[in-house]
């Protein structure tokens, strides 16, 4: 085998031994990233460290009950929900936390933040490098030379000593290690060796191996762990912030899913109420048309009732469209396909209706104070103020002169026949100081000024966050009170309009009624029934928003929540 063949074989063998599969790289990245998440999760209340970033693609609905009913109030889509899976709220939350695209994106964002931290941490662990190089060179009598000799008539040098065939092999290796110190310094060691002697076995080959070790330490610019590890410090804190954001997102997302769930049920109930109102209008219209045929009422009065029926029909049709659209949007929200056939469980509406309009047993002042203590996003804003303060110190340090101390030891290879043997007796040691004066400071000056402005801006952002949290708690408090008041009003309104409809119907049957009274009372009854259901839904949503904004809504990995003063165990 030629020298080149030996070199190639050895190189390929080394590559085969060192090569890792892509699966092992993925597993290694996951292990380190998940460990970082688990480590930081202990610092975030309500955060579970079991985060799996890989998307769960299989959607399982077979365990859900199937609807066998047809719904006349859905008009030409009356049979569209036959065979649909009946989805309860807990089922919807579980699906959303497994398959939602938004939730998956948040998990990936958290994982990538942890992945970035592993790289910053790795900078402060020993890093190793290995470089090998091999070359095979040759030259020989070229036919081009002979052709040129024949063309020019020059002396035939084919057999001359001026042309000859030669070949050479050149191979070397370099092994290195480097360790960054958190003080800003670095320790490095590098071993190089002429590998040709190993390939050929010829001890006459010239040896160029050497061992070089160095230690460097900045004394002014870049000195100290606070300055040197600022990037690592920020990466550690960024993962903590992302965990807080993820915890906050889980609460917000659970409330969003529940809110949209109840909103879909409200849209469905609205369509059903509008259908009932249309039927009532049509019955009145049939009666008045019969009276008009007998001359007991005028065509003008009948026309007014016909117009009311047309408007009721339009409201009904529009409410069906809104219901179907909201249901389709809800499918996308929880990670289902748009063509998946589901229907939400009406029992959930019954459940919140039976629960009543009870508001949280906590005063507004207590709620506001509690929010100041529990809101993780507020802690993050305060920590960002500290981050900007640290960056001022880093910017000030960058204005200093660069003064560095270094020690270098170089050990040459021995001329003996033993490969890799070093001659420590002829080692060379060097120590020195390097000074660089900051003559051009525009960039560092601007960075310093920018850091000062960033500090003021982050302080304002923190104070603004305080006000935003207070206002969000106050807003949800007001919304609960508004929904409670709306509920009380609409309970009375339904009772009043039921009596109005009953009286109008009775008078109409006796031929003493007024068509306008019939129209108004029926329309008002339909609207009051819809508003009554809406007030129940809005109060329940506002209550969830309130517990979330106070920071006392606790969500598990399946999206199930608990609310109240004490954190669930």
Image (spheres, rainbow, N blue to C red):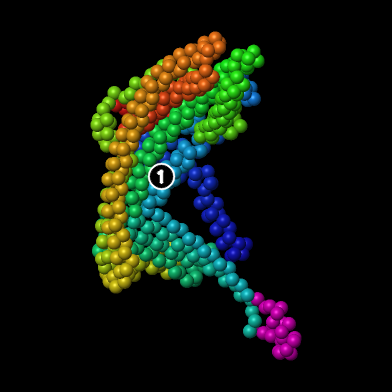
Question: Which part of the image, by quadrant, shows the N terminus?
Answer: bottom right
Q: Position of residue 3 (x, y in %)?
A: 59, 65
- Work out whether 497 lies above or below 27: above
Q: What residue would you read off at disc 1?
A: 114
Q: Give the residue drawn at x 65%, y 81%.
A: 163
- Work out whether 560 lies above or below 410: above
The crowd level at tag 1 (other Cα within 10 Å; few <14, some 14-19, many 20+) is many
Q: Is residue 156 magenta?
A: yes
Report the front residue among 175 and 329.
Answer: 329
Q: Is residue 181 left or right of residue 203?
A: left
Q: Is residue 258 visible?
A: yes
Report the front residue among 145 and 111.
Answer: 111
Q: How many labels sit on residues?
A: 1
Q: Give the residue drawn at x 58%, y 26%.
A: 307
Q: Position of residue 50 (x, y in %)?
A: 42, 34
- Work out whether 203 lies above or below 346: below
Q: Give the residue drawn at x 51%, y 34%.
A: 333
Q: Is residue 87 visible?
A: no
Q: Which residues are magenta?
A: 140-161
Q: Give the residue drawn at x 50%, y 19%.
A: 517
Q: Position of residue 256 (x, y in %)?
A: 44, 33
Report the front residue among 202 and 23.
Answer: 23
Q: Is residue 388 magenta?
A: no
Question: Which part of the image, by quadrant, shows the C terminus?
Answer: top left
Q: Position of residue 568 (x, y in %)?
A: 33, 26
Secondary structure under tag 1 reads helix
Report the front residue among 421 and 86.
Answer: 86
């Amino acid at each position: 085998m030629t020298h080149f063949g030996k070199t190639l074989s050895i190189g390929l063998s080394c590559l085969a031994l060192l090569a890792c599969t892509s699966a092992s790289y993925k597993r290694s990245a996951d292990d380190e990233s998940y460990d970082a998440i688990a480590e930081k999760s202990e610092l975030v209340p309500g955060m579970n460290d079991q985060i799996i970033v890989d998307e769960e693609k299989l959607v399982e609905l077979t365990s859900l009950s199937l609807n066998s009913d047809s719904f006349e109030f859905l008009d030409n889509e009356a049979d569209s929900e036959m065979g649909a899976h009946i989805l309860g709220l807990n089922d919807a939350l579980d699906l959303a936390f497994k398959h939602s695209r938004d939730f998956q994106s948040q998990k990936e964002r958290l994982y990538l933040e942890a992945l970035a931290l592993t790289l910053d941490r790795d900078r402060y662990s020993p890093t190793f490098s290995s470089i090998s190089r091999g070359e095979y060179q040759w030259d020989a009598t070229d036919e081009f030379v002979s052709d040129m000799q024949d063309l020019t008539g020059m002396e035939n040098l084919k057999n001359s000593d001026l042309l000859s065939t030669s070949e050479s092999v050149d191979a070397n290796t370099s092994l290195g290690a480097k360790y960054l110190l958190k003080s800003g310094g670095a320790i490095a060691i590098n071993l190089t060796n002429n590998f040709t002697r190993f390939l050929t076995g010829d001890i006459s080959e010239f040896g160029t191996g050497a061992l070089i070790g160095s230690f460097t330490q900045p004394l002014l610019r870049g000195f100290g762990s606070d300055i040197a590890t600022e990037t690592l410090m920020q990466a550690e804190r960024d993962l903590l912030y992302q965990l807080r954001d993820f915890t906050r997102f889980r609460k917000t997302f659970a409330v969003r899913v529940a809110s949209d769930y109840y909103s879909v049920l409200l849209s469905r109930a609205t369509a059903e109420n509008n259908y009932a109102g249309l039927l009532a209008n049509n019955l009145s219209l049939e009666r008045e048309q019969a009276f008009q045929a007998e001359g007991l009422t005028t065509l003008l009065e009948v026309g007014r009732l016909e117009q009311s029926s047309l408007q009721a029909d339009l409201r009904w049709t529009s409410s069906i469209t809104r219901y179907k659209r909201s249901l389709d949007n809800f499918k996308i929200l929880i990670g289902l396909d748009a063509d998946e056939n589901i229907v939400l469980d009406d029992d959930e509406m019954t459940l919140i209706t039976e629960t009543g309009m009870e508001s949280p047993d906590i005063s507004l002042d207590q709620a506001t104070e509690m929010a100041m203590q529990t809101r993780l996003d507020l802690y993050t804003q305060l920590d960002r103020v500290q981050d900007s303060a640290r960056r001022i110190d880093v910017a000030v340090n960058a204005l200093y002169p660069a003064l560095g101390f270094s020690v270098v030891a170089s050990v040459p290879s021995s001329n003996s026949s033993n490969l890799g043997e070093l001659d420590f007796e002829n080692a060379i040691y060097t120590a020195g100081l390097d000074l660089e004066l900051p003559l051009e400071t525009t960039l560092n000056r601007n960075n310093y000024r920018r850091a000062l402005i960033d500090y003021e801006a982050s302080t304002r952002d923190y104070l603004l966050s305080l006000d935003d949290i207070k206002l969000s708690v106050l807003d949800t408090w007001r919304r609960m009170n508004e929904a409670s008041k709306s509920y009380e009003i609409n309970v009375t309104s339904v009772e009043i309009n039921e009596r109005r409809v009953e009286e109008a119907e009775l008078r109409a049957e006796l031929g003493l009624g007024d068509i306008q009274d019939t129209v108004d009372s029926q329309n008002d009854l339909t609207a009051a029934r819809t508003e009554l259901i809406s007030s129940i839904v809005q109060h329940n949503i506002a209550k969830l928003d309130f517990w979330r904004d106070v920071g006392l809504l606790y969500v598990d990995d399946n999206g199930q929540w608990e609310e109240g003063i004490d954190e669930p165990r």
